[in-house]
Image: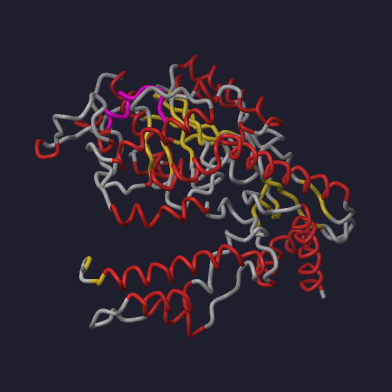
Amino acid sequence: MRAEGVAVEELARAGREVADLVADHLDTVGGRRVWGPLDAADRAWLTDQPLPVEGRSLTELVQDVRTRVMRYPMGNGHPRFFGWVNSPPSPAGVLVEPLAGALNPSCAGGEHAGSMLERSVVRWLAELVGFPHPPGGGLLTSGASMATIVCLAAARHRAARRAGWDVREQGLFGQAPLVLYQSEESHSCVLKAAELLGIGRRNVRTVPVNARFAMDTAALRATIADDIGQGLRPFCVCASAGTVNTGAIDALDDIAAITDEFGLWFHVDGAYGALGVLAEQNRAAYAGLERADSLALDPHKWLGVPVDCGCALVRDPTMLRDAFSFVPPYLRDESADDLGWFSEYGIEQTRPFRALRAWATMSHLGRDGIIRLVQHTTRLAHTLATMIEQADDFELLAPVSASITVFRHRPDPGGDAGRCDELNREIPAAVQHRGRVFFTGTTLAGQHALRACFLNPATTEDDLMTLLDEIRAAAAQLTR
């Protein structure tokens, strides 16, 4: 028998080779370099190869992946990868991903496993973070950037309808500007969404942050009142439940009260940090999350679901359906229940089977395992903060709120401040090229900083000591 021009025996043989390759990679990743630059020949092969004239065998393809691709990981599967907010892949998610590909459904809707399973996954995510979930109140997306666009489109639609016009029919031209509010520490996806939705950068207000790098709620209220006084139309506040820079959590309950006062949509960016509510030591900081009109979160971050897998959750499902539903006759499914298709709730029409790897990941961990993962990685961030505070040559720059620690290296505490800042700008790349640890830099309060994010359940306290030792070694090289 043949499948898509390939003998089943050949497919099975190549599949076993891939399974062995995956298992070997995951088993040995901790003993290899975290990251390394590409060889010139391999870079040329990866970027400049011509399309083959004749097709190649599956075995040849697997060999190319083994020798040309697997040698150059991003590094995020390694227990000493602390960069950005990129998790190691869940083994369960890796296991089922080929099965989703084998089925290859479009999860726009319809009565099949792909679209049905997504309903359970979305409900599980909402239950984990304590967000109210009516049926139809969410969908999986490519990531939080897309989830933010989906949620803010619903907010825009509601604001326009309240003002007496149909934004889908009339657009925004000729109307009083809609104004969006974010903090200085908001993720760039908020601004991107505002641009794409026609809000425009000049109608996005960036609210200052306090000493904890959370949104200044007094400044927020004053800014909204001032815009109303100028005849503008405030419509949405975007708060953060764990910023990607420091892990800061905005005062969600206070912001919810402000949005209630002014009748605004309350959106929470919990892409990285929403699951932090599961850590006992942080739970109180998330009060008010359940009051949001919408929440964006990323199962492919803290949960480790293989990318891509984001999620948009809304309190009122009709807001999404009103903003997006467009069902031509040839796609109508008269047997569908009252919820309709997922494609009515977002931008994508053809949608991949994201739910399978999310379902497998969460089922494999279970609620208790997810809580242990969040608590372990949060504890690592607090432990590193303590180690930094106890060291003479490091300085903690922000309180730990989730699983991110922001700090800087000060080998000469009384030395030149400008040189210290330049050194901290240079350290991340120097450490990355040494290969034992990977972390990234950032800027905070106008100065260069070092930033470590913890998402890997295999990371230990010994790895934290290695991180600090590698920073010291790289700094010594740079100042030699």
Q: Nearer the viewer, residue 153 or 205?
A: 153
Residue 159 forms part of the magenta stretch: no
Of 202 and 66, which appears nearest the observer? 66
- Look at the picture and state if 126 lies above or below 78: above
| Quadrant assignment, res 347 | top left
Over which residues does the magenta segment extend? 313-323
Q: Main secondary structure of the magenta part?
A: helix
Residue 35 location, quadrant? bottom right
Q: Does the magenta portion include 320?
A: yes
Q: What kind of colouring is applied to the model shown?
A: secondary structure
Residue 143 drawn at (x, y percent): 43, 46
Rendering quarter of residue 248: top right
Q: Nearer the viewer, residue 348 or 237?
A: 348
Query: Is residue 79 shown to the viewer in this render?
Result: yes
Q: Position of residue 276 (x, y in %)?
A: 61, 36
Q: Name the residue at 54% across, 67% down.
A: 73
User: Picture coordinates of residue 140 (x, y %)?
Assistant: 38, 40
In this image, 280 relative to 171: left or right? right
Residue situated furthest bottom in the rendering: 41
Report the residue at 66% width, 72% height from top: 433
**Is 385 located above or below residue 42 in the figure?**
above
Residue 225 visible in the displayed image? no
For the C terminus, the quadrant is bottom right
Tell me if 415 is positioned left or right of 118 in this view.
right
Q: Position of residue 106 (x, y in %)?
A: 26, 47
Q: Nearer the viewer, residue 399 or 371?
A: 371
